[in-house]
Image: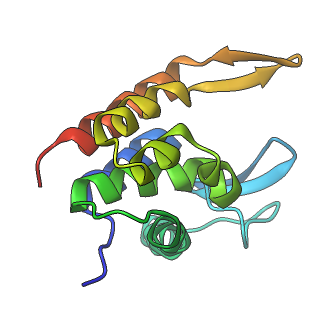
């Protein structure tokens, strides 16, 4: 059976991304809804229901990424936590995470701790930890460690 992100994983994404019903620019690109990029453009507005639909479509790509790259058995909570991480970092970012490296080595505890490493962004060329990412990674780690 193919795992899908669970409600707890979706809630982490929603809480972390926030809901914006009007398009906004961030990092030189347009976003809308819960961090949706693909069809977002200046001046665009959507409903909460449309935002939910876009999120579910976007999450499918992250689910596919995790399914393809994780080579060991995982439960629904582990899968969902990794999908949230992959949603945030994108496929190439997720493919280079400590989480993925450790879980594929069979080190589940190490993979859980790996979430906490990915809480930094580049500011003026230097990596700095960011409180909102630290909080998101803690939530992802907690979900990863929750028995399914």
Work out which residue is located at the far front of the displayed protein and give it: 105
Task: Identify which residue is drawn at 70% across, 26% down.
Answer: 121
Where does residue 144 sit, x and y in percent of width and height? Answer: 27, 44
Position of residue 27 in the picture relative to residue 90 (left or right): right
Look at the image and tell me in which quarter the C terminus lies: bottom left
Where does residue 124 sit, x and y in percent of width and height? Answer: 88, 16
Look at the image and tell me in which quarter the N terminus lies: bottom left
| Total count of labels | 0
Above or below, comparing residue 130 to residue 62 in the picture: above
Res 19 seen here: no
Frontmost residue, 105 versus 96? 105
Where does residue 2 sit, x and y in percent of width and height? Answer: 31, 81
Task: Identify which residue is drawn at 54% across, 56% down.
Answer: 87
Position of residue 98 in the picture relative to residue 43 (left or right): left
Above or below, comparing residue 30 to residue 50 in the picture: above
Where does residue 99 sit, x and y in percent of width and height? Answer: 47, 42
Task: Identify which residue is drawn at 45% across, 63% down.
Answer: 70
Frontmost residue, 2 versus 15? 2
Task: Identify which residue is drawn at 56% across, 31% down.
Answer: 118
Res 127 seen here: yes
> What colouring method underlies this structural image?
rainbow
Position of residue 130 in the picture relative to residue 100 (left or right): right
Work out which residue is located at the far bottom of the displayed protein and give it: 1
Work out which residue is located at the far left of the displayed protein and give it: 147
């Amino acid at each position: 059976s193919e795992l899908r992100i669970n409600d707890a994983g979706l809630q982490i994404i929603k809480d972390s991304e926030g809901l914006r019903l009007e398009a906004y620019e961030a990092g030189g690109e347009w976003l809308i809804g819960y961090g949706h990029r693909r069809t977002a453009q200046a001046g665009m507005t959507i409903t909460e229901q449309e935002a939910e639909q876009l999120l579910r479509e976007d999450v499918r790509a992250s689910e596919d990424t995790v399914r393809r790259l994780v080579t060991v058995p995982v439960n629904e909570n582990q899968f969902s936590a990794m999908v949230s991480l992959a949603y945030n970092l994108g496929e190439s970012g997720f493919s280079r995470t400590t989480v993925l490296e450790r879980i594929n080595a069979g080190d589940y505890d190490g993979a859980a701790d790996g979430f906490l490493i990915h809480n930094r962004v580049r500011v003026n060329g230097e990596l700095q930890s960011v409180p909102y990412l630290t909080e998101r990674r803690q939530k992802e780690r907690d979900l990863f460690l929750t028995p399914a």
